[in-house]
């Protein structure tokens, strides 16, 4: 995971961002959840800057690709007088946001690929779009989240990495005598 993330930082590109995203999500059991980030924002607003940094340290590894986490880390570090860390975190904030934006154009045919549900809001905010509605759609190959904005624009996100498709059910089969047996398949 560290190697792919370092490669993305050294050579930001769509391919390197996606490789880092795949590596991070393979390592992290779960992506960040919105409540984690809401808690960080509340702590930041309350002036609990060291607690913000401590909580960030305890988040899953997927935090490395979250623009919002880097933004909160920068704000907290700067408030504590650690300007060097603040500058690094701001750099990572911009880099992760650019990585997200490089994954697509927000159309249905080229959706933005996200690692966390909150990444969608970071992208919308960066593009100055205000969400008004949301629809989750699935096809045979991917899960897509369509955000309808207040101006009527639709912005599409590929959320396949964070919402894996459920395993396909196998119908019971009857043998020659008409006895039904359940066939289970283990995930591959």
Image (spheres, grey):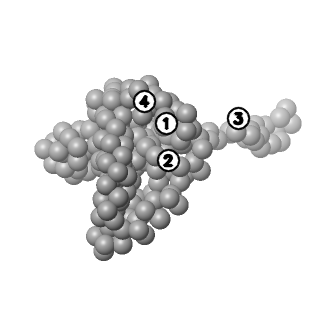
Residue 10 has which mark?
Answer: 4
Residue 188 has which mark?
Answer: 3
Q: Secondary structure at mark 2?
A: helix
Q: Which residue is mark 1?
A: 5
- Quarter of the image where one finds residue 173: top right
- Mark 1 or mark 2, earlier in chain: 1
Label 1 environment density (alpha carbons within 10 Å; few <14, some 14–19, many ≥20): many
Mark yes or no: residue 58 visible.
Answer: yes
Of all residues, the one furthest to the right in this rendering is 177
Contact (CB < 8 A) between labels 3 and 2? no
* Residue 21 percent coordinates (x, y): 48, 37
Residue 62 has which mark?
Answer: 2
- In this rendering, the answer to whether 86 lies above or below 12 is below
How far apart in space, not on screen, are marks 4 and 1 (Cα)?
A: 9 Å
Q: Secondary structure at mark 4?
A: helix
Label 4 environment density (alpha carbons within 10 Å; few <14, some 14–19, many ≥20): few
Q: Nearer the viewer, mark 1 or mark 2?
A: 1
- Mark 2 or mark 4, earlier in chain: 4
């Amino acid at each position: 995971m560290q190697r792919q993330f370092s490669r993305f930082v050294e050579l930001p590109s769509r391919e390197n961002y996606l490789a880092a995203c795949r590596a991070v999500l393979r390592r992290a059991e779960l992506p960040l959840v919105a409540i984690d980030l809401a808690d960080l924002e509340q702590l930041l607003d309350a002036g609990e800057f060291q607690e913000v940094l401590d909580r960030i340290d305890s988040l899953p590894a997927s935090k490395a690709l979250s623009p919002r986490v880097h933004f909160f880390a920068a704000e907290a570090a700067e408030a504590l007088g650690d300007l060097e860390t603040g500058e690094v975190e701001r750099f990572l904030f911009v880099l992760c946001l650019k990585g997200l934006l490089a994954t697509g154009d927000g159309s249905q045919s080229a959706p933005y690929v996200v690692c966390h549900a909150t990444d969608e809001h970071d992208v919308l905010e960066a593009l100055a779009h205000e969400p008004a509605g949301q629809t989750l759609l699935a096809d045979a190959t991917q899960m897509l989240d369509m955000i309808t904005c207040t101006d009527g624009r639709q912005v599409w996100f590929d959320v396949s990495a964070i919402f894996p498709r459920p395993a396909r059910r196998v119908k019971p089969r009857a043998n020659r005598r008409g006895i039904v047996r359940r066939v289970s398949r283990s995930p591959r």
